[in-house]
Amino acid sequence: MLLSAINPQLLISMPSGAEWIIILLVVIIFFGGRKIPELARGIGKGIREFNDAKEGVKSEIEAGIKEKKAE
């Protein structure tokens, strides 16, 4: 079967209910119950740092635009 014959929506989709349960079980098996809160904290910290960096870049761009307009 050719790859172009496959519907692209079938290749990229969100996991359904049963798939989320399987993913959750695999995570529990790999990391254990005690490591999951640490993993969640790490993910939250990474998201927070990403958002801070995004805001920093946005403010730098806006400051550059204001400087350009002032000239």
Image (cartoon, rainbow, N blue to C red):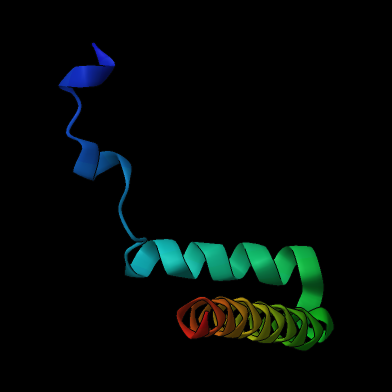
Residue 67 shown left or right of residue 28 in the figure:
left
Q: Residue at x 47, y 70 (%)?
A: 21
Q: Nearer the viewer, residue 53 or 3?
A: 53
- How many badges with numbers are in the image? 0
Residue 66 shown left or right of residue 12 in the figure:
right
Residue 35 shown left or right of residue 46 in the figure:
right
Quadrant in which residue 11 is drawn: top left
Q: Nearer the viewer, residue 61 or 45?
A: 61
Quadrant in which residue 15 is drawn: bottom left
Residue 14 shown left or right of residue 26 in the figure:
left
Vertical comparison of 7 with 54: above or below = above
Residue 71 at x, y percent in the picture: 52, 79
Residue 50 at x, y percent in the picture: 65, 77
Quadrant for the N terminus in the image: top left
Residue 4 at x, y percent in the picture: 21, 19
Residue with the most extreme top position: 1
Quadrant in which residue 42 is drawn: bottom right
Q: Residue at x 62, y 80 (%)?
A: 60
Q: Nearer the viewer, residue 15 or 5?
A: 5
Q: Nearer the viewer, residue 67 or 24?
A: 67
